[in-house]
Amino acid sequence: MNESDQLDAAFSALAHPARRAILAHLAKGTASVNALAEPFDMSLPAVSKHIRVLESAGLITREKHAQFRLCKLEAEPIRDISNWTDQYRHIWAARFDVMDNLLNDMKESDQ
Amino acid sequence: MNESDQLDAAFSALAHPARRAILAHLAKGTASVNALAEPFDMSLPAVSKHIRVLESAGLITREKHAQFRLCKLEAEPIRDISNWTDQYRHIWAARFDVMDNLLNDMKESDQ
DNA sequence: CCCTTATTAAACCACTTGATTAATTAACCA
DNA sequence: TGGTTAATTAATCAAGTGGTTTAATAAGGG
């Protein structure tokens, strides 16, 4: 799997609110599949599949622990996405510059 | 469309290398559909659909200009994604701290 | 006015996704 | 060993995605 494929998988995995909610839950610590499923109005197999998608994208890892499979957040793909967004930062920053100039112009015209 | 739906649309739109390539092209300036399609080994209607997806996600806007529809990058959804990633920054930053400590330990053992 | 260029719409197809219910596997516990 | 809990697999389904080709629309430019 090349770099582009990894980005594909990460973006795709994050494009579902349930999966982002699962990550948010895991940001507070590891959790079992049942614990992760609890807040959702969704069958357990459905949640299990979402977890599988997150795992395939490298966003979580799992460790068998007694009868539980503890899920753990892995933030590297999120960092990759953050790094990807950086190449566009100057573009939205430019919009702020326009705003700054506008505000400066307004201040000058007040004097 | 609420905030979560917008994130869904943006993540989903970015989960295809052709669409990310189109955005990279537009980062250098506005372009027509034909100009955007040129690098791809893909039919024009296929590219047209990708552009439609990007537009629906708010990642581009279009302006009719003579017989051309000039596409323009809109970076706000990318900024939204960047902001979303920030809530996980301390997690991957923690990994760097581990690395820093390791490097410091190595330096100390050199002395 | 016709012709060419630019782009989208329509119809279609294979494949994937997101969900369900029912059945199965795995491991603890008594 | 039998029961309970945890989680996945299997089978199924509706809807969505990504691509194709062919046809239609729209706007210049002779």
Image (cartoon, coloured by chain):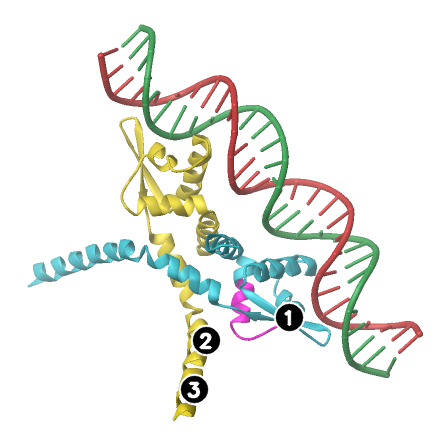
Chain colours: A yellow, B cyan, C red, D green
Left or right: B2 with respect to D25? left
Give the number of the disc on residue A106: 3
Residue holding disc 2 = A95
Q: Is residue B24 magenta?
A: yes
User: What SS does tag 3 mark?
Assistant: helix
Q: Amino acid at mark 3?
A: Met
Chain for disc number 2: A
Is A87 situated left or right of D1 in this image? right
In front of the other: label 3 or label 1? 3
Q: Secondary structure at mark 2?
A: helix
Q: Bounds of the magenta span?
A: B21-31
Q: Amino acid at mark 1?
A: Ala
Q: Are marks 1 and 2 on the same chain?
A: no
Question: Going 43% across and 59% down the picture, which residue do you hit?
Answer: B81
Q: Is residue A22 left or right of residue C11?
A: left
Residue A50: image location, x then y, percent: 44, 39
Q: Position of residue B99 (x, y in %)?
A: 21, 57
C-alpha distance separating marks 2 and 3: 17 Å
Tell me which numbered mark, 2 or 3, is placed earlier along the sequence: 2
Question: Mark 2 Cα within 10 Å, few/some/many (few <14, many 20+)?
Answer: few
Disc 1 and disc 2 in contact, CB within 8 angstroms? no
* Amino acid type shown at disc 2: Arg
Mark toward the viewer: 2 or 3? 3
The answer to whether any part of residue A110 appears in the image is: yes
Residue depicted at 20% across the width and 57% down the height: B97
Question: Are the two marked residues, 3 and 1, in contact with CB atoms closer than 8 angstroms?
Answer: no
Q: CA distance from mark 1 to mark 2?
A: 25 Å
Instruction: Tell me if mark 3 has few (under 14), some (14-19) or many (20+) residues whose alpha carbon lies within 10 angstroms of its own.
Output: few
